[in-house]
Image (cartoon, rainbow, N blue to C red):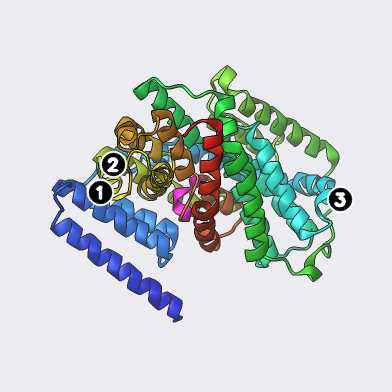
Amino acid sequence: MSFGTYGRQALMAAIAAGAALLALWPPAPLEPQQARTLAVVIVTLGFWATSLLPPFLTAMGFFAALLISGLAPPDLVFSGFTSAAIWLITAGFVIGKAIQVTGLGQRLAEAVAPHLSRSYPMLIGGLMLMGAGLSFLMPSSVGRAMLLVPIGMALADTLGLTPGSRGRTGVAVCVAFAANVPGFAVLPANLPNMVLTGAADSILGIHFGYADYLLLHFPILGLVRCALLVVLILRIFPAEAPELGRAAAAAPEPGGRQLWLMAILLATLALWTTDRLHGINPAWVGLGAAVLILLPRIGFVSPPQFRESADFPTLLLVAGVLGLGAVVSHAGLGVVLADLVSGVLPMAPGQDFANFVSLSLLATLTAVISTMPGVPAVLTPLAEQLAAQTGLPVETVLMTQVIGFSTVLLPYQAPPVLIALGLAKEPPRVIVKMLLILAAVTFLVLVPLDFLWWRMLGWI
C-alpha cells in the first residue's frame, strides 16, 4: 500500500470523524436533521474526493445512508434518476457506439487529421477550439460531449495514441473540458448559466442580455481559460512522440450507412441548436435519435453492442451527484453555509478587489457542496444582502457567480465532465490534479485579470 493511499485513508478518517461530531453535536446555525444530512453529504464528498471507493459505490452508499436514516424521502434522493441528464447520457452511449461501429468517427477523424495531426499540441488546441465553437451552436454541454468524444477518441486512434497512454488520456481530458468550460462564458450554453439568469429574473427582476454576458465573460473565462487548459493538458499529459502517426486507419463501413447516420446526427444537432424555438428538451431529442439508431434493420447498434456501450456505473455516479445537489437544496444547507462563509470572508464597501475575490471564492466554495447548477439557486436570493455588504451593484454580485461555478475543484462537481470522461472510458481521478492547478491559477491570474476587465467595462 502506497504512502498516497495511507494519506488518503488518514484524510478520510478525519473527515468521517468530523462528520460524526457534527451529527452528534450540531452547531448553533444548524438544526439536528440538517446537521445529520450535512454529515452524510460530507462523508460522500470525502469518498469522492479521495477515490478510496469507486465513485458509483459512493453514490450508492449516499442513497442508502439517507434512506435508511429517513433523512430524505426516496423521490428526492433518487431525483437524479428522473433528470433529463440521465437520458441524455444514455443517448450519448448509443450515439457514440453508432459512430464507432459505422466507422463514421474514424472517417471524421481522418477528415480533420491533416489539420490536427501535425503535432500533439495542434491536436489538443484544435479539439479545444472545436469545443469553444460548438458552445455557440449547442445549448447542452453533454450534447457537445456526445459529438466531441467519439471524434476525439477516433482521432487518437488514428494518431496511434494507444489506450493507457498519457497522450490518449490527454485527448479524453481535452474533449471533456472543451465540451464544458468554454460554455460558461456563453449565455445559453451551460445549465448553470441558465439557472443564474432565470433566478435573477424571477427573484430580482434583473435580466442579462446575450451580448452583455458574452462581452463580460468570454475574453477571460472563455479564451484565456481555454488557452490555459491547452497548456496544462500538454504539461500534465504529454504525448510520447514515437506514438504519433503510427496507427493505420481502420477501414470504415460502406459510405451509405455513414451518410444515413450523418443525416440523423445533423438533424439531431439542428434540433439541439434550435431548442429555444421548438421548446423540445435536448434530452428528448437525443432519446429520439437513440431510438432510430437502435431500431432493427434501419439502425446501426445491435442489442449486444448497446449492452457493451452502456456504462451503468457512470449513470449511478451522475444520479448521485444530482441527488446530492437536490438534497442539499431541500435541506436548506446551501443558504446556511453561504451565510457562514460570507460572514468570514473580508467584504466591506470600498474594498473592491477584496470584495470581488471574496464573492468569487464564495461561489466556488458553495459549488463544492451544492455542485455547479446549485450555486445560483443558493446565492441569488442573497445577492442584495451581499451587494449591501460589499457596496457593489447587485448585477456585479450576481455575475461573480459565473467565476465560482466555472471553477471546479473536484470532478463530482461537474456532471458533464464526468459524463464525457465516462464516454471516453477514463476514470474521474485523471483530472483531479489538473482541476486543482486550474483553480489555483484561476484565483492567482484569471480573477485579477477579470477584475481589471470588469472595471474597464464599468461593472465595478
Q: Which x, y percent locates residue 51?
A: 43, 65
**Camera-nearest residue between 147 and 205:** 205
Residue carrying label 2:
74
Q: CA distance from mark 2 to mark 1?
A: 7 Å
The amino acid type of the residue labelled 2 equals Pro
Residues at discs 3 and 2 in contact (Cβ within 8 Å): no
Between marks 1 and 3 in the image, the one whose residue lies nearer the viewer: 3
Q: Specify which label sits upstream in the sequence, 3 or 2.
A: 2
Q: Could you say which disc has been placed on residue 383 in the image?
A: none
Work out whether residue 4 can be spotted.
Answer: yes
Q: Residues within 10 Å of mark 3 (few under 14, many from 20)?
A: few
Task: Give the magenta part as a residue range.
Answer: 410-415
Q: Residues within 10 Å of mark 1 (few under 14, many from 20)?
A: some
Q: Which x, y percent locates residue 265?
A: 70, 34
Classify mark 3: helix, strand or loop. Answer: helix
The amino acid type of the residue labelled 1 equals Leu
Classify mark 1: helix, strand or loop. Answer: helix
Residue carrying label 1:
67
The amino acid type of the residue labelled 3 equals Pro
Residue carrying label 3:
114
Image position of 67 with respect to 76: above or below: below
Q: Residue at horizontal 43%, vertical 26%?
A: 198
Is residue 300 shown left or right of residue 288?
right
Q: Quadrant of residue 294?
A: top right
Q: Quadrant of residue 170?
A: bottom right
Is residue 110 shown left or right of residue 59?
right
Classify mark 2: helix, strand or loop. Answer: helix
